[in-house]
Amino acid sequence: MRPTVRLGAILFSSALALCAAPAFAQTSAMPERVIVNLTDTPATSLAFNWRAAPGSGDGFVEYAPLTPGPAYAQQATRVAAQRTPAAFKTRDDQDVAAEYYSVRITGLTSASQYIYRVGKDGAWSPWRQVRTAAAEAKPFTFLYMGDVQNDIRAMGGHAVRRALKETPDAAFMLFTGDLINRADNDAEWGEWFGMDVDRIAETPSLMTPGNHEYTKPQGAVAQALARQWRLQFTLPDNAPIEALKETVYRADYQGLRLISLDADMMDESPDSARAQVQWLERQLAENPGRWTAVFLHYPLYSTAKGRDQGELRVALQPLFDKYGVDLVLAGHDHTYGRGRPHPKGPVYMVSNVGPKQYPLGDLSWTTRKGSGIQLYQQVEVSPTRLTVRAYTMDGVLYDAFRLDKNGKGPAALTDLAPKTPELILRKDDKK
């Protein structure tokens, strides 16, 4: 794990693992690791992924508008999935062999409930519900969660389940990287999908990769994204270049433009850094909505001791300020921090939902900070107001603020943080 991001001068000159229950042991064609992702048009389309044992053959999604009773089963439309057989050895010397399936269903009705199942005759998943977005700006709430990464089965999953339990109507979940600890470790991916099998299959997700989703294959010069990423997720496909497919993208949801940046590739590749910055400016300039949230793994303003992302700030902050970005959401530092360093710029947040903890640095930019705590954030969005609340695992409100605006200019910030003391880790627990 690198302490800083080094963008380079270019920006300044212009056998399957047995996974956490309830994943299957892959002795049958039963679907596992079922997930729904948002697309770039979430009012009229959704994306579904799952996997099954090698040789399972063709797979399908059956879906229908949700009905008051069981009639949906007879009214379902069947859509064939794209099937990708995969067999490879991971960096941890695990043998992975599976059929991976993906489907992007289009032509859906906005603001509507649907029910779906995946698999094939004799090997179907349970029926599960999902909802499309509204076609216009309407109130909704989503969950923002930092690194899960470690002790996923034992502790990280508990935190995510708590977030979902306390936010039953979450429109989607947003993860800011380091979903797992060892890039292509298939057992860890099994634990991640096992955190809450039904809610992961019913609550759409968006995720951006962290440095722990990247690995350097033996003998390779450059690092590579874990094979599982594009096999098991179907994320918006509007990246600036093919190498950034499904790691850099945008999605518009009920008046909010969400933009994922691949911070690790900004560090590793000058071409990637240039492409992302140029693409980002277009997405910000052409934003049809009032609100904008950018999410990436590395924070522009660090919170952990000994870290500073100065080059990342130089590359990105001018665009955030110029185009009125409202929120910049990050992970990586295994601490908490929230602040608005410039009164006309975005609110920057760093958060950590997993159990791994770092000590705080000497911070001057934060309004509220903390360490030694696991937090999840509820982000409530309406046409003229955005409210963020951060909660600890015992359900206590730790931080909150509100942004208000009626046009395209900078939002007015109201601090709603409780008057309780900040929680600070006093030793280097897991550096």
Image: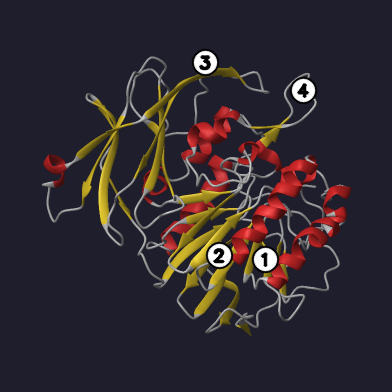
Can you identify the residue that label 2 sits on?
A: 377
Q: Nearer the viewer, residue 258 or 10?
A: 10
Q: Position of residue 44 (x, y in %)?
A: 34, 54
- Which residue position is annotated with label 4? 220
In this figure, what is the number of numbered marks? 4
Quadrant of the frame with the N terminus? top right
In terms of secondary structure, where does tag 1 sit? Answer: strand
- The residue carrying mark 3 is 15
In terms of sequence position, does the residue under pointer 1 or pointer 4 come before the other? 4
Q: Are marks 1 and 2 in contact (CB under 8 Å)?
A: yes
Q: Is residue 388 left or right of residue 196?
A: right
Mark 4 and mark 2 lie on one chain; the one further toward the N terminus is 4
The mark closer to the camera, 3 or 4, is: 4
Q: CA distance from mark 4 to mark 2?
A: 38 Å
Q: CA distance from mark 3 to mark 4?
A: 23 Å
| Amino acid found under the numbered disc labelled 1 | Met
The residue that mark 1 highlights is 349
Taking the spot 62% from the left edge, 30% from the top edge, the residue there is 184
> Closer to the camera, 57 or 105?
105
Residue contact at pointers 3 and 4, CB within 8 angstroms: no
Q: Are marks 2 and 3 in contact (CB under 8 Å)?
A: no
Upstream in the sequence, badge 2 or badge 3?
A: 3
Q: CA distance from mark 2 to mark 3?
A: 37 Å
Kind of residue at badge 4: Ala
| Mark 3 nearby-residue class (10 Å; few <14, some 14–19, many ≥20) | some
| Distance in Å between CA atoms under marks 3 and 1 | 40 Å
The reply to whether discs 3 and 1 touch (Cβ–Cβ < 8 Å) is no
